[in-house]
Image: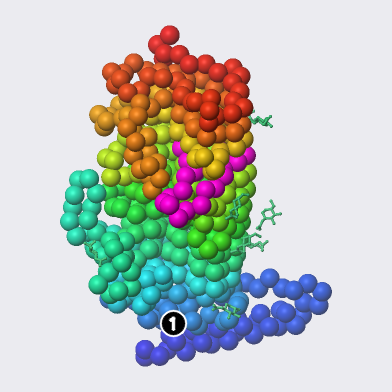
Amino acid sequence: MANHPTLFLLFKIIIIVSFILIQSLLATSHPPNPLPLTLSVTDFGATGDGTRYDTVPIQSAINSCPDNLPCHVTFPAPGKYLTGTVFLKSGVVLNVEAGARILGGTRVEDYPAESTRWYVVVAENATEVGIGGGGVVDGQAEKFVVRENERKKVMVSWNETGACLGDECRPRLVGFLDSTNVRVSNVTLYQPAYWCLHIVRSNNISIEDTTIFGDFNIPNNDGIDIEDSNNTVITRCHIDTGDDAVCPKSSTGPVYNLTVTNTWIRSKSSAIKLGSASWFDFKHFVFDNITILDSHRGLAFQIRDGGNVSDIVFSNINISTRYYDPLWWGRGEPIYITSCPRDATSREASISNILFINITANSENGIFLSGSKRGLLRNLRFINMNITYTRFTNYAGGLLDYRPGCQELVKHRTAGMMMEHIEGIEVKNVEMRWSKYEHEQWNNPLEFKSSTVNNISFLNFNSRSKSS
Ligand SMILES: *[C@@H]1O[C@H](CO)[C@@H](O)[C@H](O)[C@H]1NC(C)=O
Ligand SMILES: *[C@@H]1O[C@H](CO)[C@@H](O)[C@H](O)[C@H]1NC(C)=O
Ligand SMILES: *[C@@H]1O[C@H](CO)[C@@H](O)[C@H](O)[C@H]1NC(C)=O
Ligand SMILES: *[C@@H]1O[C@H](CO)[C@@H](O)[C@H](O)[C@H]1NC(C)=O
Ligand SMILES: *[C@@H]1O[C@H](CO)[C@@H](O)[C@H](O)[C@H]1NC(C)=O
Ligand SMILES: *[C@@H]1O[C@H](CO)[C@@H](O)[C@H](O)[C@H]1NC(C)=O
Ligand SMILES: *[C@@H]1O[C@H](CO)[C@@H](O)[C@H](O)[C@H]1NC(C)=O
Ligand SMILES: *[C@@H]1O[C@H](CO)[C@@H](O)[C@H](O)[C@H]1NC(C)=O
Ligand SMILES: *[C@@H]1O[C@H](CO)[C@@H](O)[C@H](O)[C@H]1NC(C)=O
Ligand SMILES: *[C@@H]1O[C@H](CO)[C@@H](O)[C@H](O)[C@H]1NC(C)=O
Ligand SMILES: *[C@@H]1O[C@H](CO)[C@@H](O)[C@H](O)[C@H]1NC(C)=O
Ligand SMILES: *[C@@H]1O[C@H](CO)[C@@H](O)[C@H](O)[C@H]1NC(C)=O
């Protein structure tokens, strides 16, 4: 009895594969675009009851897909499919139906030996892979909480395995490593125990209509990390998470061509952050039509390791930033551009050709632009911006934030725009509006020294109190 579904399935596969073969034999001039084969994990014995592990049936379904042909592996609704790491292979797209949920295992034995492969769903060295279908991939982060703490939750660390050190030793949610032609579309990525969606050394990635819900109090709950990868498009996403929401990083190679559009972001750290891992270049990024709400920092560059940054455009962006507990990186800056050597062994890097156009901000702190002696910021342009400065929390201000590394936190009055070590800055059609506030550390629209800022131009710049 138990074998009947499998036999039927085998039969189904044979029919479909023969159909595809006949199709290709019939096609003389154009290669066919074969219809994807669809397999359901329940046909392989998955229970979807949320308590029994479905790891083996899920992996059998994926492994039964014909090599390098398009294949959809369906998780039918309703159902909760508890599983250890799911390994995708080329051609496979997971179709998690609306009302279905993949539940990531919470035991160390649910994951492979190497911590670099700790994901609930991972594709390694694959092409034409993805996830979609309208359902949920759930990392069950709450089961990794050791202790509730109102400043920052304390999480499990699997460091006793020796697989990794310190307190950042727990699984990520979804990873595409060394892969090409990746599509994540119409899926909710929920409560990752650590980072959420991680793209590594990959090319041609599309992330669409994807919702990310992390936990506002769980450390390292990043949204999307784009590492050493080229040609990524992120659009129509909704990201609400504790740590950095969209975070390009470079560790072993550069990041080229990243586009993020029509997206909504809330983060207790940076909404968009380049770095801080920045060993190679970041080049040719576009961020357009983005709403950033209630974040600790808006648009951020944390360049620390020698990789140069150039040709980045931010357009049509509304930002609201505020202070949170200083355990979380950010000081309420709507825009934050810093390049400084992380430590004595680090190289300095430049940040050049950066355009901000059509930006509205409502923030508890000013814009911070800081190069270092040989790590200049070059050719920065700020055009069409309305910035309202208001204090609405009681956290103390008056700190310049160079973290990580460099000078760390420095006590200093902050200003509407704080600038150091810049060559070429243009400010055009920019209006600062100041609300009344009692905090003395913050009352100066512009701060820069002629010795470190050269070629600065203001056209139609206006600073006034909000009531006038
Ligand atoms: C990656 O895939 C290609 C093609 O399938 C194969 O030749 C290569 O050995 C794989 N590399 C690794 C590291 O698995
Ligand atoms: C997402 O998937 C659901 C369920 O299949 C579907 O109803 C909805 O239209 C899809 N949304 C998008 C944006 O594709
Ligand atoms: C292991 O993780 C725990 C909990 O975060 C931490 O206190 C401890 O220092 C870590 N030990 C090592 C060797 O990294
Ligand atoms: C990029 O990947 C998509 C699948 O997500 C594919 O349809 C498209 O052809 C790829 N583009 C290139 C240039 O290979
Ligand atoms: C990204 O493009 C750069 C520049 O062409 C190249 O050196 C790098 O290998 C590419 N990375 C990937 C993952 O394809
Ligand atoms: C980046 O995109 C441009 C087209 O806009 C393309 O010519 C270039 O090859 C891409 N770079 C990489 C490394 O893929
Ligand atoms: C901007 O993005 C929002 C979704 O966040 C979308 O509803 C709107 O249509 C987009 N506007 C434009 C001009 O594309
Ligand atoms: C920003 O706010 C303005 C009005 O305050 C609105 O017209 C515009 O569509 C908003 N843009 C985004 C990206 O939310
Ligand atoms: C950054 O630019 C400097 C100056 O052009 C160059 O020496 C350095 O090698 C570049 N860094 C990288 C990672 O290519
Ligand atoms: C800034 O406000 C002015 C009105 O004071 C408005 O005309 C302009 O469109 C606004 N610019 C942006 C980028 O929102
Ligand atoms: C900036 O906004 C104006 C109108 O508010 C619009 O005409 C222009 O195309 C926008 N610029 C960019 C680069 O989106
Ligand atoms: C001054 O800076 C602007 C950009 O802000 C740049 O276009 C121009 O070439 C610079 N001029 C000189 C003399 O460096």
Q: Judge whether residue 347 is colored magenta.
A: yes
Q: Nearer the viewer, residue 18 or 364?
A: 364
Q: Toward which corner of the image does residue 108 lie, by quadrant? A: bottom left
- Element on which disc 1 rests: helix
Q: Nearer the viewer, residue 450 or 225?
A: 450
Give the residue displayed 58% in from the left and 70% down from the top. Answer: 127
Q: Which residue is mark 1?
A: 60
Give the residue displayed 34% in from the left and 39% down from the top. Answer: 409
Above or below, comparing residue 133 to residue 416 in the picture? below
Q: Nearer the viewer, residue 140 or 79?
A: 140
Q: Toward which corner of the image does residue 44 lie, by quadrant? A: bottom left
The span shown in magenta is 336-359
Furthest residue in direction right, as rendered: 29
Q: Judge whether residue 166 is colored magenta.
A: no
Tell me where residue 26 appears, x and y as whole percent. Answer: 77, 80
| Mark 1 CB within 8 Å of ligand 1 | no
Of the 4 image quadrants, the one containing the N terminus is bottom left
Tell me where residue 61 appears, x and y as whole percent. Answer: 46, 79
Q: Nearer the viewer, residue 188 or 203?
A: 203
